[in-house]
Image (cartoon, coloured by chain):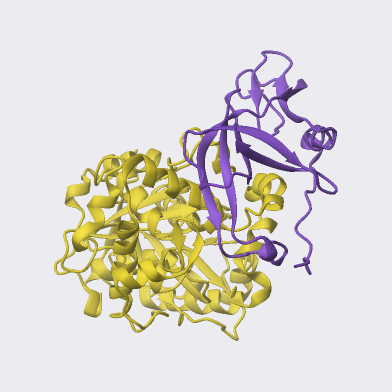
């Protein structure tokens, strides 16, 4: 079934633009504090450890394990109606951060199960997704 | 200086709660505010502090203009969604305790049941949801049911909380709504009805979710000394506190995603009031979802973390149970008025005006607020 209403498109904030540009290159990039090295996500202005605003962006592997999930059975935006039911997984990344993504596994997610990242092609940005490792 | 017992809720007001009100949010807010002043026995002229709830209805200037207030000494907005009304009790208590104001109005009105403004679209206009809007909405994480569901799922998996535990909360609220003429939901439900209701965002079913409704509610908070001369028996604010979760704008990034701001606030409020959870006779707990009630009971210390499910089993939250909760029907079955309706109901109970839902002899109770992605507030009240 074709989607009559388009899904909401990401509107990158200035502070997060390198994250979105990274996705377009096929990378999951997070902020790394240039002063103390602490990683952070979602992108924000300051390092909460040392308050520096200096940032290097670092590509991470996207490996981790399942922290929690939900299965959506109701479309709160008509753009998702054709995809119901779909599963959203919260991932505890190996680098100590979290990510939300779409679940590509055939089975119901199991909390604690290892996963790998998959960037599903899409316009204008790929969809951050995860599959069983 | 402690602000315990320095303030009283002296006036309460509500409009009819409906779906599809022809009245604007501002009209509903003003109507509720007028009723609260009348209930307190003050003139709207006497209001000298205003905390409008939300940012879609009236602002302080509207109250000055419409009520002819000539000496407004304080106004502020508290932008924390459903935690805002109870957070506003904290501000109002501090204001009257410090002698800055005598009568602070807290008023809310909403008209959201029109299709164009459903929750899934509405929240993305709110700045506190900016992470969700940028990083999660495009993936299909659109509305509170979906955003909160992973918290509940993890709670079930870690602690063994069950669908029946969620159902207990839904059934208790519905039973109480049936005793309330101003409740939207009119039909009884069973645990089986709850389990059979359609899935929305697992583990949430339709009957785990609160209503979309229209209406206005308001309270007047007055200095305890001033309250002596007003119409009703005094209801004191004995303990009140606010707390924010870590990673307040993204549940995804929260170190413990089952934690809430209330866990930080509740011990402060109980200490201030000098009471313990065992002393509480009636509770009005913010019930955006059934799970939220279970989790807040844990955070307030009614039971240990993870034991909220078994705690609510066997009708404990129903009238006649050990902790009658949401005696008006709550957001789940009365109406979703951001929990200002919970404050109104607690005051009604402590005055002994609870009607068919009155908890016999209720002298001490509490109300909680829960906003946005887990901001929390609590007020413990006792009657004179």
Residue B243's spot in the image, x, y percent?
Answer: 44, 42
Would residue B112 be found to the left or right of residue B153 on screen?
right
Q: Quadrant of residue B179?
A: bottom left
**Residue toward you, B341 or B203:** B203
Image location of residue B375, percent across then percent down:
49, 47
Horizontally, residue A47 falls left or right of residue B257, namely right
Res B284 visible: no
- Residue B68 visible at all: yes
* Residue B291 horizontal side relative to residue A67, left or right: left
Q: Is residue B27 above or below residue B86?
A: below
Disc count in the image? 0
- The extreme bottom residue here reads B22
What shade has chain A been given?
purple
Instruction: Residue at 58% x, 51% y: name it.
Output: A87
Q: Indicate the colour of chain B.
A: yellow
| Relative to B105, residue B178 above or below | below
- Residue A47 in the image: state x and y as whole percent: 66, 23
Q: Residue at x 50, y 34 (%)?
A: A113
Check the picture and name the quadrant holding the C terminus of chain B: bottom left
Name the image quarter holding the N terminus of chain B: top left
Counting from the top left corner in percent of width and height, residue B184 is at 42, 80
Q: List the single residue furthest toward the top.
A: A36
Give residue B304's quadrant in the image: top left
Q: Nearer the viewer, residue B332 or A68?
A: A68
Q: Is residue B360 left or right of residue B13?
A: left
Which residue is painted at 72% across and 30% down in the image?
A45
Q: Nearer the viewer, residue B239 or B313?
A: B313
């Amino acid at each position: 079934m074709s989607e009559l209403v388009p899904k909401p498109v990401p509107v990158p904030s200035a502070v997060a633009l390198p994250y979105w540009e990274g996705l377009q290159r096929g990378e999951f990039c997070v902020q790394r504090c240039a002063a103390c090295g602490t990683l952070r996500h979602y992108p924000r202005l300051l390092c909460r450890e040392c308050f520096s605003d200096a940032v290097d962006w670092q590509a991470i592997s996207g490996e981790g394990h399942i922290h929690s999930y939900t299965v959506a059975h109701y479309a709160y935006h008509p753009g998702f109606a054709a995809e119901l039911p779909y599963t959203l997984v919260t991932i505890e990344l190996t680098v100590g951060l979290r990510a939300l993504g779409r679940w590509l596994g055939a089975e119901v997610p199991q909390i604690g199960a290892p996963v790998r990242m998959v960037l599903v092609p899409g316009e204008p940005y790929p969809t951050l997704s995860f599959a069983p490792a | 200086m402690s602000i315990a017992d320095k303030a009283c809720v002296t006036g309460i007001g509500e409009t009819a709660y409906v779906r599809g009100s022809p009245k604007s949010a501002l009209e509903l807010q003003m109507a509720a505010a007028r009723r609260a002043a009348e209930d307190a026995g003050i003139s709207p002229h006497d209001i000298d502090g205003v905390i409008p709830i939300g940012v879609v209805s009236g602002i302080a200037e509207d109250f000055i203009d419409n009520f002819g207030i000539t000496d407004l000494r304080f106004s502020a907005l508290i932008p924390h969604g459903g935690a805002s009304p109870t957070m506003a009790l904290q501000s109002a208590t501090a204001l009257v305790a410090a002698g800055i104001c005598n009568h602070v109005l807290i008023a809310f009105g909403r008209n959201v049941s029109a299709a164009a403004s459903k929750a899934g679209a509405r929240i993305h206009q709110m700045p506190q949801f900016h992470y969700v809007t940028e990083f999660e909405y495009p993936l299909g994480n659109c509305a509170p049911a979906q955003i909160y569901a992973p918290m509940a799922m993890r709670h079930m998996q870690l602690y063994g909380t069950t669908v029946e535990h969620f159902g207990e909360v839904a059934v208790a609220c519905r039973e109480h709504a049936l005793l309330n003429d101003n409740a939207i939901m009119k039909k009884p439900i069973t645990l089986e009805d709850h389990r059979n209701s359609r899935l929305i965002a697992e583990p949430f079913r339709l009957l785990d979710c609160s209503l979309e409704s229209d209406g206005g509610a308001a309270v007047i908070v007055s200095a305890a000394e001033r309250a002596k001369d007003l119409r009703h028996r005094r209801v004191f604010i004995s303990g009140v506190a606010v707390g924010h979760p870590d990673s307040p704008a993204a549940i995804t990034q929260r170190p413990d995603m089952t934690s809430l701001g209330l866990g930080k606030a509740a011990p402060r409020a109980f200490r201030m009031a000098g009471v313990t959870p065992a002393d509480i006779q009636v509770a009005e707990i913010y019930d955006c979802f059934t799970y939220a009630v279970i989790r807040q009971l844990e955070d307030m210390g009614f039971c240990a973390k993870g034991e909220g499910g078994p705690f609510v089993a066997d009708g404990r939250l129903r009238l006649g149970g050990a902790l009658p909760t949401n005696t008006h029907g709550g957001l789940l079955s009365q109406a979703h008025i951001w929990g200002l309706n919970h404050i109104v109901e607690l005051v009604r109970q402590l005055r002994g005006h609870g009607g068919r839902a009155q908890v016999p002899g209720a002298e001490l109770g509490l109300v909680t607020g829960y906003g946005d992605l887990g901001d929390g507030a609590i007020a413990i009240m006792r009657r004179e």
